[in-house]
Image (tube, grey):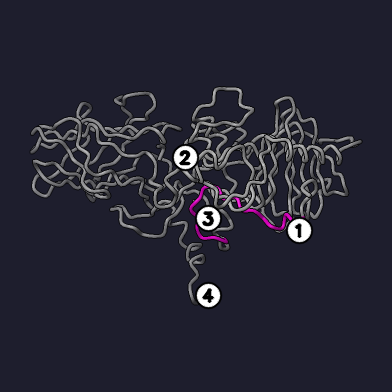
Amino acid sequence: MKTQEKIFSPFVIASILIPSLYAANTLIQNIKGGQISAKPGSYNTRIMTIENGDLRFMNKGNDDDIVGDYFSWYYFDPAFGFFETNTTIDRVRISSQSVWDCSSSDYDWYELTGHSYNLEFGFVDFNLSSSVYTYICIPKNGNNDILPSYIGWYAYSQYIGFQNFDGITLDSSVDMSADHLSDGRLVKVDGIVSSKNNSEAIDGQFSDDVRVLGKITKSGLRKNIHKELASVTRNISPDNGVSPYTVEALWNQKWTVWDDGKTIQDGTILYFWNLWGHNVEITGGDVQGVKTLIVEWGNIYISWNIRGGGMLGIIVTQKNGVGGNIYIDPSVTDIHAILYADRSLMSYNPSSWEYDGDTQADILPNQLYIRGTVLSENTIGGAVTTTCPYYINNTCNLSLSKKYDLNYLRRYILVQPTDEDGNVTWLKIPQYNGQESYMNTLTRWSKPDYRNFPLVIEYNPLIQQTPPPLFH
């Protein structure tokens, strides 16, 4: 919601059935039991929700379209008993009709339509007329972490009168408790990574699986990178090529004239300089050889998957407060590289600029797997303490802190495919038809729990044996 042999291999089965699975309905939320509507209905009774799981909110088609999402199972009226919401022909669902009944502009609001059913009293109409209907308020982009969805106004039956649903609430996002820790841990780091703050943000959050190489805000690591950079580019007369700048030939053992930029050190380094904040786009491919891409005074934009058995280093530096970021397109699922950024890794699309904490989940539904390491100014858990990188001059708020928190680089999460009655039909799949890492769908993760995380950073030990230039 706005709130991817004869003994049958599971991967073979998945490859056959995935297209039909992605059309499946998925569970958004088991609506909390024990709620009582804020206002009474015709017989001075208030609608009640029963036990957890007895009233569900479903995403029809597992997509980002709110219209058609529906309720399943039961609610309770003390005067008349249980009412079923998933009637076969006309279940209670979100209509395309917008209304203006929500409490603030932080919500999108829609009329509900359809009928619930009671065995003795028949049908209850959720959209009788232009003045008698129920509605649902759903948080707009970026608000689904702090605001609940809620239902309001009346349903009507000619036999029992009005049922008032004011005050019945539901979470606007998928319940993640089964797959993630309750402290907001959404990134899995296995090996070496550097960030502005990691274990400080959430006590002990990463103490078991992060060996901190160093904070690049301190002089050591950053100084060494820049010292090596100055050494290898001394007396070089760079030619950036023709804008827009692109890097394509990752599959060659060494950098070639196919790419923009200046090749140095026998093609093991591709160098862009003095870009005044412009982007160099990496269009992806399978990496061969051992080589390093350097962008000074600009940004790198990774628009396609980077995989393969080679060793790729990526270095991007800032100057005069401009550049120094590694931008990653939301479509990218795999990056096999060592990533060094004077500033940060960020989700990005050239038509939309940088995505921040206000970005809706369906824009960033894909998993991202980085095999290598990450050295940047991103935080890990910074959104919990509203912490931003040192270079952010604006007041740090929740949206900005999420923008730089690796926990929110992606919003991928697994959801449960069901039939229209909410019965489980298959193993969990990504929300909003998101895509999983290539490493997950075509081979096997080195650790099974990797599948649960939006972002996985796994250290590649070959870095120590065959490091790319400047990472010795």
Quadrant into which the N terminus falls: top left
- Kindly check if marks 2 and 3 are in contact, taking CB atoms under 8 A apart as contact: no
Q: What is the three-letter code of the residue carrying label 3?
A: Tyr
Which is more foreground, mark 2 or mark 3? Answer: 3
| Distance from the alpha carbon under mark 3 to that under mark 1 | 25 Å
Q: What is the three-letter code of the residue carrying label 2?
A: Ala
Check the image and name the residue furthest to the bottom. Answer: 6
Q: What x and y, as percent, mark residue 131?
A: 21, 26
Q: What x and y, as percent, mark residue 64?
A: 43, 41
| Distance from the alpha carbon under mark 4 to that under mark 1 | 36 Å
- Kindly check if marks 2 and 4 are in contact, taking CB atoms under 8 A apart as contact: no
What is the number of callouts on the image? 4
Q: What x and y, as percent, mark residue 210?
A: 59, 49
Q: Earlier in the sequence, mark 2 or mark 3?
A: 2
Q: What is the three-letter code of the residue carrying label 4?
A: Glu
Q: Nearer the viewer, residue 32 or 430?
A: 32
| Distance from the alpha carbon under mark 4 to that under mark 3 | 25 Å
Q: What is the three-letter code of the residue carrying label 1?
A: Gln
Q: Secondary structure at mark 3?
A: helix
Q: Secondary structure at mark 4?
A: loop
Please tell me which residue is depicted at 54% across the width and 47% down the height of the picture: 206
Q: Which mark is residue 5?
A: 4
